[in-house]
Image (cartoon, helix red, strand yellow):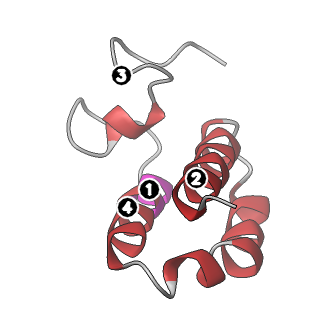
Amino acid sequence: TNPGLLFHLQQQRLIEMIRQGQVKEALEFVQEELPPLCEDNASFLSELESTLALLAFENLPQGEFSDNLEPDGSGPPPEL
């Protein structure tokens, strides 16, 4: 398996949970699924920390963290 690919797929799944307001599910998912992937790769942990910062904000201004919510990074996230 490719750990980088698996991590990014799981990270995208987490981002989708956050976008949909599923905070409890997102936190459970992080605790269960992502620690093993981050143990051997510090860059994964850094990316995960940035992704988790999304949980701290309801309405994000454009910036470092809000870019994680954008599906392709080219514009604002769609209305839910």
* Residue count near mark 4 (Cα–Cα under 10 Å), binned few <14, some 14–19, many ≥20: some
**Disc 4 element:** helix
Q: Measured from the top left, where is residue 55 in percent x and y?
A: 50, 57
Residue range of the region highlighted in magenta in the rendering = 52-56
Disc number for residue 26: none
Of discs 1 and 4, which sits in the foreground?
Answer: 4
Left or right: residue 80 versus residue 55 is right
- Which mark sits nearer the N-terminus, 1 or 3? 1
Badge 3 or badge 2: first in the primary sequence: 2
| Marks 1,4: beta carbons within 8 A | yes
Q: Identify residue for label 4.
A: 47
Q: Amino acid at mark 4?
A: Glu
Which of the labelled discs sits on residue 11, or is there none?
A: 2
Q: Earlier in the sequence, mark 2 or mark 1?
A: 2
Q: Look at the image and tell me in which quarter the C terminus lies.
A: top right
Residue 22: give x, y in percent of width and height. Answer: 74, 50
Label 3 CA crowd tier, 10 Å (few <14, some 14–19, many 20+): few
In the displayed orientation, state which residue is furthest to the bottom. 39
Q: Residue at x 44, y 56 (%)?
A: 51
Residue corresponding to mark 1: 51
Mark 1 to mark 4 CA distance (whole Å): 6 Å
Mark 2–mark 1 distance (CA, rounded to whole Å): 8 Å
Residue for point 66% across, 39% down: 16
Which residue in the structure is indicated by mark 3? 73
Quadrant of the rendered structure where residue 43 is? bottom left
The residue type indicated by label 1 comes to Thr
